[in-house]
Amino acid sequence: MTPNWFVAWPVRGADAWLADLAKDAPGGLHFLAPADVHVTLAFLGRYEPWLLKKMTSLLKGLPIKEIDVTPDRLVALPQPRRFSALAFSLAGGRFEVEDQITRWRDRLCREVGAPIESRPMLPHFTVARPDRRIGEADRDETLAWLEQLPPQPHLRLHLDAPRVFSWADKTAPTRYQLLD
């Protein structure tokens, strides 16, 4: 299967906090490595290696901002009963992230022939995914855990300059790899 690729801001400053969060989490979840945590700017579809140099050159020339953010609530996406990810929505910095996505996403997609995104914007960063065979009890326990987990606006995180990512090899210690 050909991997997908995307442009995203790597999230810096969450390593210890995510490790603590994972310790208290219910079973049936896999937490992402800190290097995998990101906020997607543009999804580019099927990876075309010959377009990588064009995308990295474009990113270097655009004034896309680094942004300080704070997480809000941890939510189950795309919907609670059938979630495939646990992600933090953004509290502080959300409007800046939305502004940068609005300014640059379509242009990045057009430059490499990727479809323009039609879904509503939902700036977030995924921190965990359920096991492929998560049971109903673990799913219910996860949803109950999410309900009691308070918002996290005290945590200050930094979104570094956007980078180009793709899926990593299944044997890699991370889920994603940097392409640039």
Image: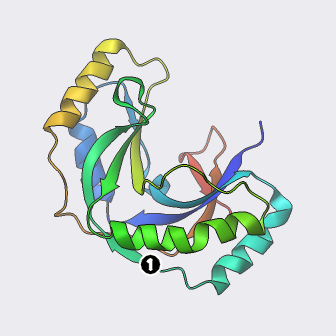
* In-image side of 70 versus 95 (left or right): left
- As drawn, the residue found furthest toward the right would be 50
Q: Is residue 159 among what the camera can see?
A: no
Figure colour scheme: rainbow
**Residue in the picture at 49% in, 73% down:** 100
**Vertical comparison of 41 with 5: above or below:** below
* In-image side of 33 versus 26 (left or right): right
**Residue in the picture at 49% in, 66% down:** 9
**Dot 1: what SS?**
loop
**Of the pair 177 and 96, the residue shown nearer to us:** 96
**Of the pair 44 and 60, the residue shown nearer to us:** 44
**Residue in the picture at 46% in, 32% down:** 84
The residue singled out by tag 1 in the image is 66
**Of the pair 104 and 68, the residue shown nearer to us:** 104
* In-image side of 148 versus 134 (left or right): left
* In-image side of 52 versus 130 (left or right): right
Quarter where residue 173 is shown: top right
From the top left corner, tell me how far across and down residue 5 is, in percent. 67, 54
**Vertical comparison of 130 with 15: above or below:** above
From the top left corner, tell me how far across and down residue 73 is, in percent. 24, 49
**Residue in the picture at 50% in, 23% down:** 132
Q: Quadrant of the N terminus?
A: top right
Quarter where residue 108 is shown: bottom right
Dot 1 surroundings within 10 Å: few (below 14), some, or many (20 or more)?
Answer: some
From the top left corner, tell me how far across and down residue 2 is, in percent. 77, 42
Amino acid of disc 1: Glu
From the top left corner, tell me how far across and down residue 117 is, in percent. 62, 54
Q: Quadrant of the C terminus?
A: bottom right
- As drawn, the residue found furthest toward the top would be 136
